[in-house]
Amino acid sequence: MAIAGDNQAPWIEPIIEAHPRLAAFDCDGTLWSVDSGIGFFEWELERGVVGPAAVAIARSQYAGYLSGSVSEDAMSGYLATMHHGLSVDTVRAAAEEYVITNVRPTFFHDMVRLVDQLRDSACAVWLVSSTNQWVIEAAAALIGLSADRVLATAAAIVDGFVTDRLERVANGPGKRTALQSAVGIAPDAAFGNSRWDVEMLAYARQAYAVHPTAELARIASERGWQVLYP
């Protein structure tokens, strides 16, 4: 996804000149500004993508998440498995529509430029996210990345239908685990915006905190990680 204009953030060139061979990116808050996991959840409930019973459970789970009784990992997992019984084609089409209308307008152009230039320099770029795989795969396609470079929270698929079994929750320590399992080596560079990215950032040879939360900004300062404001 090429970005028009000649003004490029000055921090992009030093990253490219370091010649990373493997780079890992968080997505929500790092590549774009919105929370696409919760955004897609609310969008599809409004449109009846999932049935009434699933909607009731989903709203209960979300209320528990907001109150602190449902963990981040549990909520991330549920946002994938709540599609149990739906065809993959149905969920994928919904995710693509949501991403085009609600996520693409919020892309950080500097980050898209960075991904473009890393990819052009033969760097292997991976997206690692707690948001479900359909949303992240749809967004990946818009920035020139294939679905096999996505490590997102994933529900198992059987005969073309979503099941209630989780294959992966890519959140917190799960992001590092996903990278270790899929790639087997530490990234040369990693990019994230919150405490849920700390383990992945610490795993990388060079860590970058992007529009960091207050907690991640403190950790970045303590560990000497570069902070970016695209």
Image (cartoon, rainbow, N blue to C red):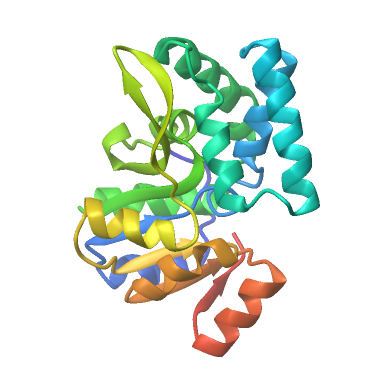
Query: Where's the N terminus, which quadrant?
Result: top left
Question: Can residue 153 be seen?
Answer: yes
**In the foreground, 199 or 51:** 51
Q: Position of 186 compared to 81: left or right?
A: left
Query: Where's the C terminus, which quadrant?
Result: bottom right
Q: Position of 143 compared to 109: left or right?
A: left
Estimate the x, y position of residue 220 in percent, counting from the top left: 56, 80
Estimate the x, y position of residue 87 in percent, counting from the top left: 43, 10
Estimate the x, y position of residue 13 in percent, counting from the top left: 39, 67
Q: Quadrant of residue 195?
A: bottom right
Q: Residue at x 29, y 12 (%)?
A: 159
Q: Position of 83 compared to 23: left or right?
A: right
Residue 123 against residue 138 in the figure, above or below: below
**In the foreground, 128 or 180:** 180
Residue 104 against residue 68 in the figure, above or below: above
Q: Residue at x 58, y 81 (%)?
A: 219
Estimate the x, y position of residue 205 in percent, counting from the top left: 32, 76
Q: Position of 169 compared to 211: left or right?
A: left
Q: In the rendered picture of this protein, how many numbered marks are placed on residues?
A: 0
Residue 61 against residue 116 in the figure, above or below: above
Q: Residue at x 65, y 81 (%)?
A: 218
Q: Quadrant of residue 148?
A: top left
Q: Residue at x 79, y 40 (%)?
A: 63
